[in-house]
Image (spheres, helix red, strand yellow):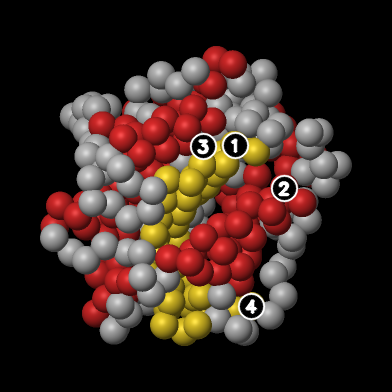
Amino acid sequence: MLASEESQILVTLYNGIKERMMASPPMSIQDQRALLESLHEPASEPTDVTYEEVRCPGTQRPAIWCKPLDANPSQVILYLHGGAGFAGSPSSHRKLAGHLAKAAKSLALVIDYRLVPENPFPAALDDAVAAYQWLLSKGFDAKNLAVAGDSAGGNFATASVLKLKQLGIQLPAAVVVFSPWVDMETKGESQVSNADKDALSPPGVANITVSLYLGDKVSPKEPLANPLYADFTGMPPFHISVGGWELLMSDGIRLAQKIREANVEAHLEVAPEMQHVYHFMAGRAPEADRTISEVGEFLRSKFGK
C-alpha cells in the first residue's frame, strides 16, 4: 500500500528539521527546542474541541486541558508529549491530543514535564506519576483514566504506569503509545534497516538522546528507563502504533512482544511507509486518521472496565 500524498507533508517538515539540526555550527539546545515546536503544524485544528490551561503537580508551565464538546467529563487521557526528552510542550502537542480526546470522547490533559539535560532520568517519569496522582485526588476513578504519549512521551507513559504498579497505586484502564522510544541500548533492527527512510532522525541521534536522558550513572537496562527490561505482569492493556519507515519501528514491535510475554493485551499497528509519529497528520492524512479512530475505539472499550 502506497503512502498517501497528504502524508508527504510530514516528510517535508521532517526533512527541513533534520537539515537545520545537522547544519554547522551546531544549533543550541534552546534553538532546537524552538525548532521542534513546529511539530504541531501538520495536524489540523480539531473541531468542537476547546482548551483550558491549568496548574497541577508534574508540570512546569501550565498543563492544557483538551475538552471535546461530546466528551465524557469523567474520563481523562493523561498525555505525555514527545520531543526526545529535551523538547516539546503542551502547545506543540495540543492538536494531536485534541484529536485523540475527540476520538475517545474523553478529556485529555497534556502536561509540561521537566526536560533533559537540565533534569535527567527520572524527572519526567516522576512528573507523570505526580500528574496521575493529582487526577486521582480530583476524584477521577482510575478505571476512567488512560495514559498516552508519543516518542519519548511513549517511554514516559509506559514507565510511569510501571512505576504506579511498583507504588501500589491503582492502574489506569489503558496505555496508548505512538512511535515509542524505549530501547536505551539502540539495538533495534530498524535503526539500520530504516536509516535511509526515516525523514526526521539524523544519524547517531539515538545515542545522543540516550546520553542526555540517562547521564553516566543510570544503566540503559534500568527497567523504568528501558521498559524492554520491565516486568509487565498485571499491567493494563496497551495500544502501540509505529511507522513502517521510522528508526523506532523495532522499539514498538519489541515492546508489544514484551507485553504479550506477560499475558497482557497489546494491540500493535505498523503503518506501512509511515514516519515517526505519523499521527501528527491527524485531520489531514488518512493513515493518521485511521489510527486515531482505532485508538479512540480502543480507549472507549477500556474506560470504565
Report the residue at 55% width, 81% height from top: 71
Q: Is residue 244 above or below residue 29?
A: above
- The circle drawn on residue 287 is 2
The answer to the question of whether label 2 and label 1 lie on touching residues, with beta carbons closer than 8 A, is no
Q: What SS does tag 4 mark?
A: strand
* Relative depth, front residue between 151 and 289: 289
Q: Is residue 237 left or right of residue 229?
A: right
In the image, which disc is placed on residue 270?
1
Q: CA distance from mark 2 to mark 1?
A: 11 Å
Q: Earlier in the sequence, mark 1 or mark 4?
A: 4
Residue under the point 72% across and 75% down: 47
Q: According to the image, label 3 marks what residue?
A: 28
Q: Nearer the viewer, mark 3 or mark 2?
A: 2
Q: Amino acid at mark 2?
A: Glu
Q: Nearer the viewer, residue 37 or 29?
A: 37
Q: How many marks?
A: 4
> What residue sits right under mark 4 in the picture?
49
Residue, x 72% and y 68% (percent of image)? 45
Q: Are marks 3 and 2 in contact (CB under 8 Å)?
A: no
